[in-house]
Image (cartoon, rainbow, N blue to C red):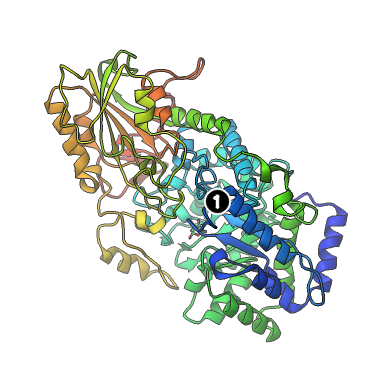
Amino acid sequence: MLSLRPEDHALIEGLIERMSLAQKVGQILQTERLAITPEEVRDHHVGSVLSGGGSCPGDNRPSDWVSMNDAYWAASMTEGPGRLPIPILYGVDAVHGHSNVRGATVFPHNINLGAINDPDLVRRIGRATAREVLSTGVDWTFAPTLAVARDRRWGRTYESCSEDPALVARLAPAFVEGLQGDLDDEGIAACLKHFVGDGGTSEGIEQGDTRVDEAELRRIHLAPYPPALAAGALTVMASFNSWNGDKCHGHRYLLTDLLKGELGFEGLVISDWDGIDYLDDDYSQCVARGLNAGIDLFMVSENWRTFLKTVERQVREGIVHESRLDDAVRRILRVKVALGLFTKPRPARRPLAKQPVLGCPEHRALAREAVRRSLVLLKNDDALLPLARTARVLLAGKSANDLGNQCGGFTVEWQGASGNHLIEGGSTVFDGIRALASACDLDPEGRSADPTKHDVAVVVIGERPYAEGLGDIRSGEDVLIREGSQIRGTLKTLEPYGQEAALEALHPEDLETLTRIKANGVPVITVMLCGRPLATDPELAQSNAFLVAWLPGSEGAGIGEALFGAQPEGEALFPGRLPFAWPKDGGAPQWQGDEQENVRFPRGFPWPR
Ligand code: GLC
């Protein structure tokens, strides 16, 4: 719940009474920084601006971000005839650290945090992320994702902590507590997303249709929201997916009756990226349905002028009651008051704006702890691990020295990118191993494997970066036609990552490397970077030890620390547990109750849970 004082409510109601229709309509708009200038924010009374994935000002330095936010803030606070000073709210996808910004600490993705399952660590990461976000003048992150991903073919599986709703529900409040804190100078607004059922679509199709009865929707996909709301989350993002054919963005029962009524949510509901556009062929219908369903703030990537005109006309024509518009404005103002935006100085004068917080050593050490603790050991024949410091290591695999593959999507660019050109600071797996091994030869294809020179090979393999629908795995476009036909509205899809959730099908180069090294008589320790479980029986067979690192982020040295047993005193070695079952084959998961059947390793492996 929002804890606002009587004077806060008085301020909000007083503003609403004084606001013109144009000022109210402007307040419910969020648009992308590339689509609007500070002057246009001022002239159209715009309430919020965002950075889409990879949309970064200037040279993408904290000072560039602070200058940009300062300009938008000053524009929004302009007073004068027909202008009311209402501070802008700037949002960004700081989903694993402030990962858009060069030099930020890129924490492991949520799938890693699910493998650790420690609310205290999640809280500490949230706090560090909030500090780095605030150092750039931003007040709001579109995180945490509370998806309970039920099909590994979904391109956003790595944004989910687990297939187990109880595990996600356990971590959910910790994200909010870490990010928001006491909403003092070190707190930012959290955003619970995507409401609701994003991880349950048929065939794992991003933005697809979640076909479950209400009892199952509540038991699985809604489960993380009550504890997160109770922790005081200020914002919720509506989901692109449909529920039994009806899109969440136009679903009054879900957004208003359930979220705002039954669950008592008093903050704001934001649409996803042009999310209302897919409700109907007629844009006016899209706007009216979204607003009347309970969306309060509209993320409109470009066509914000059309949006403003449409809303104003619909209110004048009574298609949207002004009371609904007032309620939306009220919720937005509540969030801004709760964040202290009406009393804080301009971004450039806020406490953290001058601090060298971004990518600081303390945060990187925290990220290395998360990396070490999220590693899941699936195989360790003859107790090959941990390695002795005297080991002569051959380091191979396409991801042995690749920050981009470690970080995955939503890293500096929307989709992220392989290589070391995007991410500043941090360490690769190579950096970590060469700091600890007596000898370390880097040879990505492993052609120099020689048992007279190498005691062991560490081979870092797996997926390349992707985000959202570009990460989906599906067997063919017929799947889309079949599943999309069940949805009332438009299904937006992107080119999938592959056709089968099996590593050999997606990246045959990895098995080739493992086989080559094994054939030369050097024992193989496989380290797999991936955004989800994949069938890996052939790769497991070529490995003496097999470690899943998921998407560890910028601090890859944590992997080397674990491989050599160099973790701090008191920290267990390889404590990670599978947050998702690990498959035998690349097809659809087979659920039997709350467990998947026909798996190579069940959720929770290695025991104990
Ligand atoms: C994207 C994602 C959402 C993100 C938003 C802003 O489409 O669905 O998770 O917060 O757009 O980048």
Which x, y percent locates residue 373? 46, 28
Image height of 241 relative to 96, above or below:
below
Q: In the figure, is residue 265 to the left or right of 91?
A: right
In this rendered view, identify the residue nearer to me: 291 or 197. 291
Residue at left offset 35%, top offset 25%: 433
Quarter of image, res 377: top left
Q: Name the residue under label 1.
A: 222
**In this view, which residue lies farthest toward the left?**
519
Image height of 151 relative to 597, above or below:
below
Residue at left offset 72%, top offset 62%: 74
**Does dot 1 land on a helix, a strand or a loop?**
loop
Q: In the figure, is residue 504 to the left or right of 58?
A: left
Determine if residue 463 is in view: yes
Residue at left offset 34%, top offset 51%: 153
Quarter of image, res 447: top left
In this rendered view, identify the residue nearer to me: 311 or 509. 509
Determine if residue 231 is in view: no
Image height of 433 relative to 229, above or below:
above
What amino acid is found at the position of numbered circle 1 in the picture?
A: Leu
Image height of 519 relative to 122, above or below:
above
Q: In the figure, is residue 11 to the left or right of 131?
A: right
Which x, y percent locates residue 402? 34, 39
- Which of the image's four quarters has the C terminus? top left
Which x, y percent locates residue 345? 77, 52
Which x, y percent locates residue 496? 31, 58
